[in-house]
Image: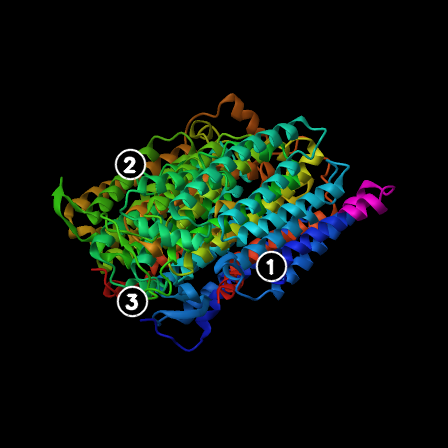
Amino acid sequence: MNFLELFRVTLPETVLEVAALLVLVADLAFLRKATLKTRVAVAALLGVAGCGAALWALSLSAGAGYSYGGALVLAQGGTALVAQAGILVLTAITLLLLFNETFTKHIGEFVAVLLMAAAGGLIVAAAQDLLVIFVGLELLSLGLYILTAFAKTSGKSAEAALKYYLFGGMSAAFLLFGFSYLYGITGSTNLHQIMLALFGQVGVDARPMITAALVLIAAGLGFKVAAAPFHLWAPDTYEGAPAPAAAFIASVSKVASFALLIGIGAAAVHIFDGMLSPVGFVIEVPAGHALHYLGFNYSWSLILTSLATLSMVLGNLAALAQVSVRRLLAYSAIAHAGYILLGLAFFSHSSLSANAILYYVLTYGLTTIGAFGVVAVVERATGSDKMDAFAGLHERNPLLAAVLLVLFLSLAGIPPLVGFWAKFNLFAAVLGVAHSGLPLYLVALAIAMSAVSLYYYLQVLKRAYVLPAVDETPIKAHPTTTLVLVGIALAVVLAGCFPTLLQGWIECAYR
Amino acid sequence: MLSIGTPNSVSLLAWTIYISFAGALLQALLPKGKATLSRWLALIVAVAGLALAVQGFIAGIGQGRTVLVDLPWVPAMGIHYLLAADGISRVLVLLTGLAAVAGVLFSWNIELRTNEFFAFFLALIGGVYGVFLSYDLFLLFVFYEIAIVPKYFLIAIWGSTRREYGAMKLALYSFVGSAMVLIGLLAAYALSGSSSTGLVALAHANLPISAQMWLFPLVFVGFAILAGMWPFHTWAPTGHVAAPTAASMLLAGVVMKLGAYGCLRVAMGLFPHGMDPWGFSFVGVGSWRDLFAVLAIIGIIYGALVALVQTDFKFVIGYSSVSHMGFVLLGLMTLNQIGLTGAVLQMFSHGVIAGLLFAIVGRIVYERTHTRQLAELEHMNLSKRLPFAAWAFVIAGMASMGLPGFSGFVAELQILIGSWVNPWWTAASGIGIVIGVAYTWRALQRAFFSDQPANKQAHEHDNHPLAAITWPEVTGVALLTGVSLVVGLYPKILLDTIEPAVKAFLAGGVQ
């Protein structure tokens, strides 16, 4: 055990925790008398500075990660690096949208908890060991429960937090149960050693047990990414939580959890690296298409496939019936989780799939934060997040309406916005693994479902652009908020027109 | 292969896309209440686009396929920003330029949110130019989808009868069609070895015939939805009727051509073996080609018959578009030089004539009489009160019936000759022409030259003289009738450009 080495690897997390403490100190010790506005501004800016410092710390670390007893515990570079940088940037953007928020008087605590949860996200994104994964997930989740409950005067917020917490506790228990099975079968808590040991078990009696363990784990992680049928918390939480908390749950927590799933996939795919030819090794399934998960004996792939299918169909169809924009975003989040799980179910040996999934989840996170930013502004002005509250937005705040247009069209996957490119890239990666049979049908289903999604996104845009305003008073947004939202919209357009910018960076991180 | 010619004046054609999008952006940024400025700006942009299109057309005479721009876009996936123009593209770009100018002229009276109207209008035009000039399938798809969203808003905001329904129906039909195309695009890309999305590269990828057998109908139908192929045409009448005049002109004039162009360039160009015989035949239908030809003929006759019984003047034109586009699709399915040439010429001809008809019905007549019901119009004695409209409609109607001397005659004649590959096709579509004469004649007679006595209500109307014809209307009518006459009297002007391109296309694998 080398503490210095551990400190070097966890420097970004440490920086975030220090920033969280600084925010608390500043808010509680020096700003007791200041107005809420000042306190929000100071807390948010300190938080952003903390994210910036953590990003810098991240850029310093260039090593092989932290190993213990010859087994990798925390990874560095590659998926971990991209996801961690994404988490930090998205956290900073969430904080920048805090200005003018009045849902709580305890803004210092809010920002501090947010930063700590982000630190948990950083650990999850890098963890390669079951115990560390669990610790990271709990650090992240506990923070999210508190954030959800932060609007103390709102009954909805409390309800949302309780539901989220109960579901979360349950799914954590499932996850831990699954982990314990895995440990029991393989005698290790390290992902890579587990995969290797599991491959040794293929064809042996342990197969039903492995499947049971994987189902339990999928239930636990499916909850985190809001995949059907473990999605029931999402609509209520998205609806009740304070907007910044909801944005954080929808983006940062997603990035961390999907990074973890990529880590698992990569570990499963790469067990033979160094032992066999670099081409990899493919199990030929009777139907003739190749599934790349060796160690998992393709139950993992099947589990993920069913989660993906269910999420795509259920998320998109349920979203059609929503009148609350927050609930609509929740169901659309379920649908998007379905698309991404499809990419995970057919995971390529090359970095193609990992790249595509990261690209998708990062850009999706950014778009969702922006969407919640717009919802928050409208909600503050109208007191409602119902679709009808958006009526006549183009008159009440043309800029905000334009941002909403760009973000929602991107979520629907209309080119040249980034959402389209993310989908194209992801589906191309799936078809790159196998271009006939099941993957092809599922990609076709996913594309058909995203055609369905246009309907409900257009329902919101119709109100914003087509219907006349009931109340014509202009909606004012804080200048910073406007600036950040316009920045997000521009980023969505630019990243869509020049997809290589972000993609090049992700690919660089892999080298 | 692509001839990488030296940059010449044809490459200015690419600027049609850029100035349209720049114009759209400028319009969006224009302050409210500057309607006049907005109109003139739109007209300038549209005329500049037309000028570039004419210049490119003239410069391109005698040239084959010219590459306009070729930049790597996403090198890792072989996606290029590749614009090129052959004769077919140049003719359709010319049509787009004409439709844009005419559309602006006939929207001169739009007072509601003028700058937004022209922003969506020019964005749509830019997307259409882009589709006609793209030589990379991915890029073509991007432009194709860019054109969908503005259509929705143009109809939903500025439309009339059941505008929200019509707009949503159109948007969803288009999006479902493009989803089918996207599945085809992804599958073709994966099957071809994922090295390029260039149309030429994909056409030379020798996709397995079994794959082409399902890719061809998928992509063909995906595009043909937008071309109004029976039974997927139902968006067309409702969309056309709901749309504001300029949008109906664009829908019928160029957007339906996008579909037909996609059928030709993508479905037939990339998957020619999809049209091979199935090996069995069912009631005379032995291949996808036969099937689509039959659907096209059904569209011709069905559209014409339904047009014959409409009570709403605009529905007559809406269904006539379905009928005329049936000729285009039939021409495509002849797979011979004369039939394909006729199809392309019919795209141009119908674009001009349908635009003219919609302008007369939707703008010149409806804006003055505030009714489109033939039963009411026939009491209004319009031939006396609006002689300009009456004579313009006589000319447009003659052109639409396919009288010699107008562009429609040359086009439909060629398609009929081409369709002789199966004499039944010729006979059946000949019936369509006869019904076409009937419904045009009926609409003309009832709307303008009715000898019904003016009823009481109309008498009151009579006391209000109808507003005088304005200069934009005269200019627009003169432009479109002039073009139809010139092409009808001297078709060589277009045929010299279309024929070599069709020959090259047929030599490229489609037999």
- Which color scheme did the rendering employ for the protein? rainbow
Q: Amino acid at mark 3?
A: Pro
Q: Is the same chain shared between marks 1 and 2?
A: no
Report the magenta stretch's main SS: helix
The 10 Å Cα crowd at callout 1, few under 14, some 14 to 19, many 20 or more, is some
> Residue B302 bears which disc, if any?
2
Q: Amino acid at mark 1?
A: Leu
Q: Measuring 47% from the left and 43% from the top, which residue is drawn there? A: A337
Chain on which label 2 sits: B
**Residue B106 sits above or below residue A59 on the image:** above
Look at mark 3 in the image and give the residue it sits on. Answer: B500
Residue B181 position within the rendered picture, expressed as x and y whole percent measured from the top left: 36, 50
Please tell me whether residue A38 belongs to the stretch shown in magenta.
yes
Q: Look at discs 3 and 1 and give the one toward the viewer.
A: 1
| Quadrant position of the N terminus of chain A in the picture | bottom right
Q: Which contiguous range is marked in magenta?
A: A24-40
> Residue A6 bears which disc, if any?
1
